Amino acid sequence: LIRYNKGGLREITHRQRGQGDATKAKLLSDPNFAKWISYSIDRQGFVDKVLEGNGIAATVQTPAATTVYPGTTWGEVDQENQGKYNPVSADPTKADEFKAKVLADMGVSSVDQLPALGLLTSEDPQNTKLVTPYVLSVLNNLGLKVTLNQQTGNQYWNTLLYPALGYDIAIAGWGPDYDDPYTYMQYWQSSSQDMGTTFNNKDYDALLQKANATTDLKARAALLVQAEALFSDIGTSTPLLHYKGEVAVQPWVKNMLTSSFGVSLNYIWVDIQK
């Protein structure tokens, strides 16, 4: 049995501008609202108990195994942001602190007074091995009024992506195209429409542009760490988990290669020794 890090990210995309509803937009654009949800999520518990270890609790967008420059991974470079903005395990005390801030920001006294929200997903809400039923249960336990909108195939993408942007909160994700943190960061810059909605933050855009303009790889990594911190603090997505994979291989199949980006299993160098 070969186990490997697939890369990729499962996340809650949020802070869409309310689809014309000013009250909803105010709630979804509040970083305290995202943190209230984030600190209510038991990422490690979900990975351990539901996925039976077949995943990695994600507290930032970029998986730790991603290469930053030769011989160095993101987990080694970006230690300061791991768990700083999004916890590995639920923290009810911190969640309650952010809940109080949300109610104050919205000028209401109870969760019942917050607007109802829609949760868009392409997953089967009855499949407990997927994140949708868990996230829905967390939102319901917080007292939020949430309507599930399950769509599949092109219907889901046509609702999620620009120009429709037809959601309040969505279960979404990203598969890396190449082995570099930028593949996880670029789709939130203002010029991108890869995830439909963007971060639209000039400071974030400037950090990415500066990072890609430098040839000093360590300086570039430091700029990307700043970008990750900025997005983790006030960004438009809450990370949930990074993917892992496993495949059963006969002992006479040699040189099976795995990858954390692109195609997970590479058969080019496989040798059948039987």
Image (tube, grey):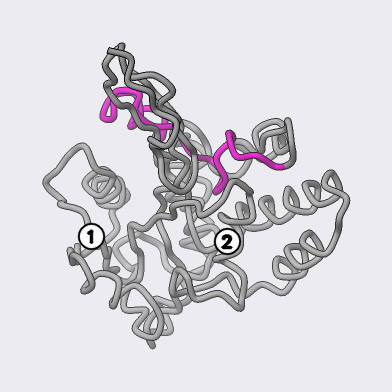
Q: Nearer the viewer, residue 96 or 67?
A: 67
Q: Position of residue 8 (x, y in %)?
A: 45, 46
Which of the two marks, 1 or 2, is nearer to us in this view?
1
Q: Position of residue 205 (x, y in %)?
A: 71, 70
Depicted 83 relative to depicted 142: above or below? above
- For image coordinates 46% across by 52% down, the residue present is 99
Q: What is the three-letter code of the residue carrying label 1?
A: Ser
Q: What is the three-letter code of the residue carrying label 2?
A: Gly
- For image coordinates 55% across by 40% down, the residue present is 63
Query: What residue range appears in magenta?
Result: 43-68
Magenta-colored stretch includes residue 61:
yes
The quarter of the image holding the C terminus is top left
Disc 1 crowd rating (10 Å Cα; few below 14, some 14-19, many 20+) is some
Q: Position of residue 107 (x, y in %)?
A: 48, 71
Disc 1: which residue: 122
Disc 2: which residue: 235
**Circle nearer the N terminus (1, 2):** 1
Horizontal side of 188 relative to 42 (left or right) equals right
The quarter of the image holding the N terminus is top left
Residue 238 is labelled as: none
In 3D space, how far apart are the residues under numbered discs 1 and 2 (Cα atoms)? 22 Å
